[in-house]
Every structure is written in structure tokens, then in C-alpha cells.
Amino acid sequence: MRIIADLHIHTKYSRATSRDMVLPTIALWARMKGINLVGTGDFTHPAHFAAIEKELVPLGNGLLVQRGKETEDGAVRFMLTAEISNIYSQGGRTRKIHSLVFTPTLDAARKINSTLAALGNVSSDGRPIFGFPVKDLLKIVMDASPDSMLVPAHAWTPWFSIFGSKSGFDSIEECFGDLAEHIHAIETGLSSNPEMNWRLSSLDRITLISNSDAHSPSKLGREANFFDCEMDYHDITDAIKKKDRKRFLFTVEFFPEEGKYHYDGHRECGILFSPEETRKAGGVCPVCGREVTVGVMNRVEELADRPEGYVPEGAIPARHLVPLQEIIAEALGKGVNTVGVRKEYKRIVDMGGNEFNVLLDMEEEDLRRIAHPRVAEAVIRVRRAEIDITPGFDGEFGKISIFGKNEEVKPAGPRQMGLF
């Protein structure tokens, strides 16, 4: 069966996360998006783990479902997932690494939680912070269950990732040592895509996964993984571990330029640099004289041993999209969080089945039938990658432009919106 999986999310127990990120609302939005498998997020937090035990029921296949929906066709499935932060010193440098943890049973999650609770504070944040090496976290995860997985999260983000320019490593082996063979996948993150990662031959054995890292319900599915396999934890993780193109079909990606750390720069001074411009400036902000934040593109080029455009054998494909609410907002000349955009989003999704169906699968004729003409045109242009993007940098998202300056969008008035 086709599975659309988003395996990295957060709940209301994580900092800077919407209060709406609770299991029932997550399931509701997942269905609107077209996601049929979603991570629980934050299972290390005691209050959220209690909610998982109360509100979800194990299905015996490593996944869970909302209580009372065990036999409901199309009910969203959950996988036990969490993100954990390790901040420690290694090789004379401070390392700050975020990791995703997947585990197949409540018992295994309890073992992980019990061990972590003895080593630090698991109650203060849904993404707890520990001072021991991430290699030791991998041991804890594997000891809880050999079927558990640890995946380096948003692997290129400057501040908190395995390859980050500020606190990361140059290779998986440098980070995990003799346990590196147990790392089967990395998460590309919003500011990089598979094409960028393909430039490193050292990652050829690694499967590239993509997830939303959602902190609010509407952000679910902004990146995701498409499988064709059994709705079963073991089949899904086996497809990831074996990089099986028959079962792991493709990932859905942000255009990486839209990510917050794609290019280099200094947000406070309004300085945006390409990697080449950073080198010419000696890595220094010309306004304040401090170091610029080196972004993902620069870091990839630093570690890459292949040219841009290289596609390794067995690579899992990727498709690049813009979230539907962002498309609607630009097409109608309205803010992405305005009432008009939210209403139009809900109406299109209701008529189109779900967001992924609208963005990926719907025939153009049908799309033009259900959507505002400019929205339909914008979706089609995004499918063709006919867009312009000002790259994100130093924590600021990139800016997408679907319509050119000579196609200035006039805001849709009440009558126009009412027609559609």
C-alpha cells in the first residue's frame, strides 16, 4: 500500500511549539494532508508518554492507532518517535547533535525513557538535552530494542546537527566511531535536499529521509517520505535500512533554498552570501565584522567530493513542493495565516481529497475545476519548478516567488473568493 510518512514532529511539550500539537489534532491534520503514518513526537516527555499510553493502542506491528479507531479504514497510524539533543565536547570542540529515535514498542520506549531520566531532565522539554556523547545515546537506543533506530536529524543545520558548520563532524564515522555501521539513514532537513547529499560518496550507503519537524499542525507534511510496503514498523524501517527503491519510492522536499540556513549570511546586518561570496569576504560580515553563519550549501561544498548534478546508483528520487497554504497566499495576495487563505485551503482540500493529492496527483483539468484560477496556475508552476527563490540564511526562511513582477497579484475580494 502507499504510505505517506512524516516521522519527525513535536508536541505542545516542546519549546516554541503550538498548544494544538496534541495527538487528536495531529491525526486530524495528518488526514487533511494525506499523511497516513505520523510520528508521535516527544515520547521521552513523561506527560506526552502518558497521553500516548492513554490515547493510542498498539496494533502488534510496531505501530499505534487512536483508541476506538482500531478497525477504522484509513485511520492514521502512529510510530513512536522522539528527538533528543546531545551537547558535549569531543576532539577539543563543543558538539551539538540532534537525533531522531524510532522504536517499535511501548516497552522499548519505557526502557529508553527510564535510562534517560536517570541521566538528565526529561520533563523540561519534549526535546531533552543531555551532556553525554551521541554515540552513547545510540547504545541506549539499541539496548532498548535491536529494532530501534537512531537517525541524525536535519543533518546539515549549522548549530545542531551531525554535519553542522558550527558544531558538527565531517563524517558519520568521526561522530559514531565503531558504531557507525548502525547508522542507516540521515534526515536531510529543510535547507538541504537529496541532490546536495548525493555529492558525498561517503553517504552512498546511507538512506536519505525527509520529515516536517513540524511545530504546528499546519506544518505537517512540508517534507515527507513515500513508501509502497506493508503498514508495519518492521517493513518500513527495513525499507529504510536497505535503501530499497521498490518499497521506498521517493521523498517530498522543500525547495532547499527556502530553508532557513541554505545560504550564508548575517541576519542582523541583512547580509546574504553565496558560498563564493563568503570566501571572497573571508567569512566576515562586512557590516559588523563578525563571522557570518555558514549555511548548508557552503558546508556541503566543503565536504563534497563530487560535482553538482551527480546522481549515484540506487539513489531514491525526490520531488520538490511548496506547501499549499503558501501557494494560496501568494496566488491571492494574502498573508499565509489570514482567514481567507485558511478558508480557501480547507475548501480545496475538502474537494481535492487531501493536500498531497492536490499538489502531486490531481490532473490539471480537475485542479482548475476546484481551485481559484491563480491557485491552480501556481500549483502547476510549482510542479514544474517554475519559481524564483531568494535563499534563506542565518535563521530566516527563503522567499518564494511564483508569479513574476510583471504578473502582480491583485488581492481577491469577497465576491471573487465567493465564486470559488
Image (cartoon, helix red, strand yellow):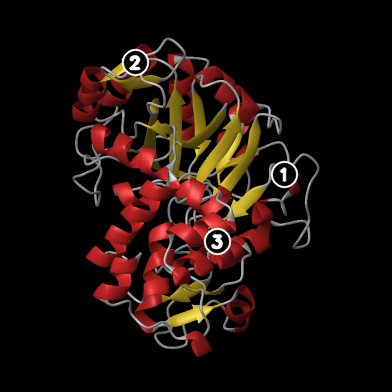
Q: Is residue 128 visible?
A: no
Quadrant into which the C terminus falls: bottom left
Q: Secondary structure at mark 3?
A: helix
Residue at the spot of label 1: 202
Question: Given contact means CB atoms under 8 Å apart, are the residues at marks 3 and 1 in contact?
Answer: no
Q: Residue at x 45, y 27 (%)?
A: 102
Q: CA distance from mark 3 to mark 1?
A: 21 Å
The picture places residue 292, in percent across and down from the top left corner, at: 47, 74
Q: CA distance from mark 2 to mark 3?
A: 38 Å
**Which label sits on residue 256?**
3
- Which numbered disc flags the more N-terminal residue, 3 or 1? 1
- Which numbered disc flags the more N-terminal residue, 2 or 3? 2
Question: Is residue 13 toward the left or the right of residue 266 in the image?
Answer: left
Q: Residue at x 60, y 64 (%)?
A: 297
The three-letter amino acid code for the residue at tag 1 is Ser
Q: Secondary structure at mark 2?
A: loop
- Between disc 2 and disc 1, the foreground one is 2
Q: Residue at x 56, y 50 (%)?
A: 360
Question: In terms of depth relative to the viewer, which is nearer, 91 or 215?
Answer: 215
- Which numbered disc flags the more N-terminal residue, 2 or 1? 2
**Which label sits on residue 70?**
2
Q: Quadrant of residue 257?
A: bottom right
The three-letter amino acid code for the residue at tag 3 is Pro
The picture places residue 328, in percent across and down from the top left corner, at: 40, 66
Question: Given contact means CB atoms under 8 Å apart, are the residues at marks 2 and 3 in contact?
Answer: no
Q: Secondary structure at mark 1?
A: helix
Quick one: which residue is furthest to the right in this view?
313
- Between disc 2 and disc 3, the foreground one is 2
